[in-house]
Amino acid sequence: MYQVQCAREWAGCHFGTVELGDARLNRRVIEVATAMADDPAGSIPQQNKNWSRTKGAYRLFDHQRATFASISQPHWEQTRLLAGEAAVTLFVQDTTWLAYKTHPATCGLGRYGREEGWDGLGLLEHSVLAIEPQADGSGRVLGLAWGKLWARDQPAIGKNGKKRVARRCAVDRESTRWVEAVKEVGAPPPPGAGAEAGKRWVHVGDRESDLFELYEQTQRMAAWALWFG
């Protein structure tokens, strides 16, 4: 049985090592993370309770050093440390669309949705959720082990066969995110001394992840790959 942490304790554990080049920004990250953990379903003003704290949160989000990766990195690292303590960890990968249809003035967006008839403008996020299987069939969520956020700024390919083949061979094709995730998560800890068994890390994805490069990368990392249709 694992212990549930209070919001501030959790925020300090997962974001306490954030380094944005300014101690005030670092503290603000922990304060905002605490507010979000206290009220996950609330809006930014609801989470931060008063205008001063709300304004501080918006200033943090607007700072050039406060990027998706720079703020998330400490949490990713903490999640991998927790995974290293588990006998088996499932790293479940998937991509979601972030729709901004109601924010037409937002800059830096790209198309999302089906290639032939895309649904609008927004962002795409690929996440790796770490889960420790439990003896009773449930799972303990350890956190996110890695993530990627991007805007799809290339035009839709449509049904053009030659363009599709060329795109599938491109170095910067979107499917490489599955392989990139395995590289970023890294290898499980090696077996310890004595009778201690090695840790097993299993990367899980849907049929889009059925790539030779992904299986090849998991073998390099002494991990496993599992996909479902």
Image (cartoon, rainbow, N blue to C red):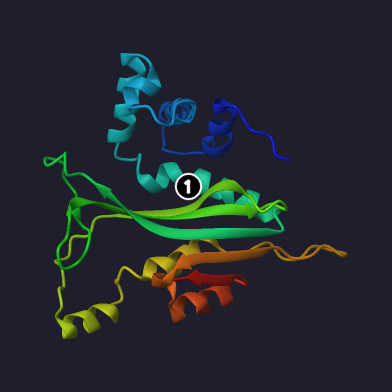
Residue 159: image quadrant is: bottom left
Q: Is residue 187 visible?
A: no
Q: Which residue is mark 1?
A: 73
Q: Which residue sits at x=58%, y=77%? A: 219
Q: Residues within 10 Å of mark 1 (few under 14, many from 20)?
A: many
Above or below, 76 relative to 229:
above
Q: Residue furthest right?
A: 194
Task: Say which quarter of the image contains residue 202.
Answer: bottom right
SS label for mark 1: helix
In the image, 64 versus 30, the foreground residue is 30
Measuring 59% from the left and 53% from the top, which residue is drawn there? 131
3 horizontally vs 38: left or right: right
Q: Amino acid at mark 1?
A: Gln
Q: What residue is at 54 percent from the left and 34 percent from the top?
A: 16
Please tell me which residue lies in front, 105 or 59.
105
Q: Residue furthest left?
A: 105
